[in-house]
Image: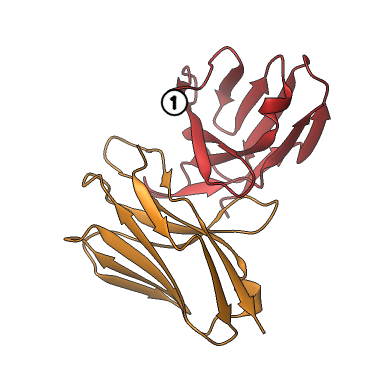
Chain colours: A red, B orange
Amino acid sequence: GAVVSQHPSWVICKSGTSVKIECRSLDFQATTMFWYRQFPKQSLMLMATSNEGSKATYEQGVEKDKFLINHASLTLSTLTVTSAHPEDSSFYICSAAGAGGVYEQYFGPGTRLTVT
Amino acid sequence: QQQVKQSPQSLIVQKGGISIINCAYENTAFDYFPWYQQFPGKGPALLIAIRPDVSEKKEGRFTISFNKSAKQFSLHIMDSQPGDSATYFCAASKGSGGYQKVTFGTGTKLQVIP
């Protein structure tokens, strides 16, 4: 149980376009979802925290207007990278909480974004 | 400010050996310390976790040792296998106030050689 999926698993887009990444909790209701960004050979950096039906809370330095997060239901959160640039190329990972205790988070498989 | 420091950055261990990864934290409000295993191109997967009210937790070949006074914790992988080759992240979070963000260490790339 406690499976989190992401779609797409990889995406290539042109500079200036927008791309949407979906994060779904498949077998539980995710009260809270988190979005992380990971550069090659580096750790995961939290971008934002989203609660169902509420506005996302962004970490310092993360542009709210560039990385739009929507948590419209208890099983779906989306991250939209607007006006993407090559420096936005990264591995984006979501996690979801709500399946077990307050400490347990389940991570998705990640989405590789390449902006050309 | 980095809140969870992890060492070593990389580690090579022979098959059957013990892999040891160390972490230190600064925020005494943390009350949950998980370890994650990540394979290339995949999301991290929870390996084992510990609360600060115990000093050690063992699950199979994986053991967490926790030293609350020193604000340090470590992961021991016994009888290391080539399939254990991955990047390991220690992390910390606090449970008060609902679901809280996880602060990750910098990661340790483990290579287990036959």
Q: Position of residue B26 (x, y in %)?
A: 26, 47
Instruction: Note whether residue A33 is visible.
Output: no
User: Quick one: label 1, few (<14), some, or many (20+) residues within 10 Å?
Assistant: few
The answer to which quarter of the image holds residue B2 is top left
* Residue for point 70% across, 39% down: A111
Q: Is residue B25 left or right of residue B79?
A: left
From this view, report whether residue A81 is shown above or below residue A11: above
Q: Is residue A95 left or right of residue B71?
A: right
Q: Position of residue B75 (x, y in %)?
A: 41, 69
- Which residue is disc 1 drawn over? A59
Chain ID of residue with mark 1: A
* Residue for point 64% across, 35% down: A23
Q: Is residue B114 left or right of residue A50?
A: right
* The one of B89 and A21 positioned closer to us in this rendering: B89
- The amino acid beneath tag 1 is Glu
Instruction: Note whether residue B54 is visible.
Output: yes
Q: Position of residue A14 (x, y in %)?
A: 83, 21
* The one of A60 and A41 positioned closer to us in this rendering: A41
The answer to which quarter of the image holds residue B71 is bottom left
**Which residue is farthest left?**
B69
Q: Is residue B106 left or right of residue A77?
A: left
Q: Position of residue A57 (x, y in %)?
A: 44, 22
The answer to which quarter of the image holds residue B95 is top left
From this view, report whether residue A57 is shown above or below residue B46: above
